[in-house]
Image: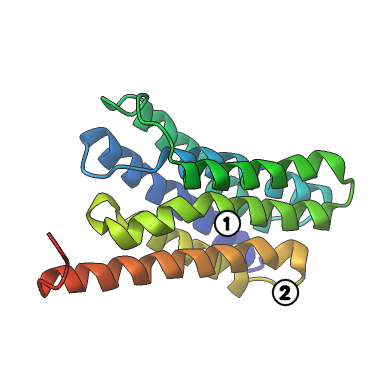
Amino acid sequence: MPLGSFAVPTGAVLNLCGSGVYALRTLRGSVRPNPVTWLLWALAPGVAFAAQVARHAGLPALTTLSVGLGPLLVFLCALSRPGFRSTRPTSPELCCAALSLGALVGWWITTEARTALALSILADGCAAVPTVVKCYRHPETEERTVYALMALSAALTLFTLPTWTFTTAGFSCYLLTLCGTLLILLRRRSAQSGLGTLPP
């Protein structure tokens, strides 16, 4: 049986486990997810998943699906936290949300699956901007586990692909790049905080 038959579902489980840890810590109040990012992160992979199914991408689509279900869980858990629903997005966050939603609307306009996948990656990236900024400015409000497991999941998917095409590998390449960036930011800022170089 092909290695991908085991590795890709394993990667999907890793994504869900990482989001589960993040959701639990959200309930406990030890992390504070950005509502704009996590809501849109639940929507954008849904478009990517639909595009991959349309192109018969096979098992790699499981990674994309799991990337969407996890953020939905996090967002729902965050709704139960005091003050979450009264938090208003900033103007830059609303701008990122508008760009992300605009890219998602493109899915309904185009009938070409690869174009839809590209737009979904753009939408997911725009949604990620507020959390990238938060990882840099306030790393203490974030949790590394979810990003590490997402990166591992994407790497497993890419490792098992018999051939790389934009449809099968595009979203996983994007996800690996994004999570790697977030982990580097969190590690760097945590190290600086430990050295006492950050402002109070």
| Side of 77 where 167 appears, left or right | right
- Nearest the viewer among 128 and 43 is 128
Q: Which amino acid is tagged 2?
A: Pro
Q: Residue furthest right?
A: 111
Q: Give the SS element for disc 2.
A: loop
Q: Residue furthest front?
A: 91
Q: Which amino acid is tagged 1?
A: Gly
Task: Please determine whether, in this image, residue 100 is positioned above or below residue 58.
Answer: above
Q: Which mark is residue 8?
A: none
- Report how far apart the C-alphas of labels 1 and 2 lie in the structure: 26 Å
Q: Give the SS element for disc 1.
A: helix
What residue do we see at 77% from left, 70% from top?
A: 165
* Label whose residue precedes the other's in the sequence (1 or 2): 1
Place of residue 164 in the rendered image (x, y in percent of width and height, measured from the top left)? 73, 74
- Nearest the viewer among 98 and 186 is 98
Residue 95 visible to an observer of this rendering: yes
Q: Which residue is mark 2?
A: 162
What residue do we see at 26% from left, 50% from top?
A: 141
| Side of 154 where 117 appears, left or right | right
Mark toward the viewer: 1 or 2: 1
Q: Which residue is mark 1?
A: 125
Q: Tell me if mark 2 has few (under 14), some (14-19) or many (20+) residues whose alpha carbon lies within 10 angstroms of its own.
A: few
| Side of 21 where 38 appears, left or right | right
Residue 70 visible to an observer of this rendering: no
Total labels: the figure holds 2
Task: Please determine whether, in this image, residue 14 is positioned above or below residue 79.
Answer: below
| Side of 74 where 58 appears, left or right | right
Place of residue 23 in the rendered image (x, y in percent of width and height, measured from the top left)? 34, 39
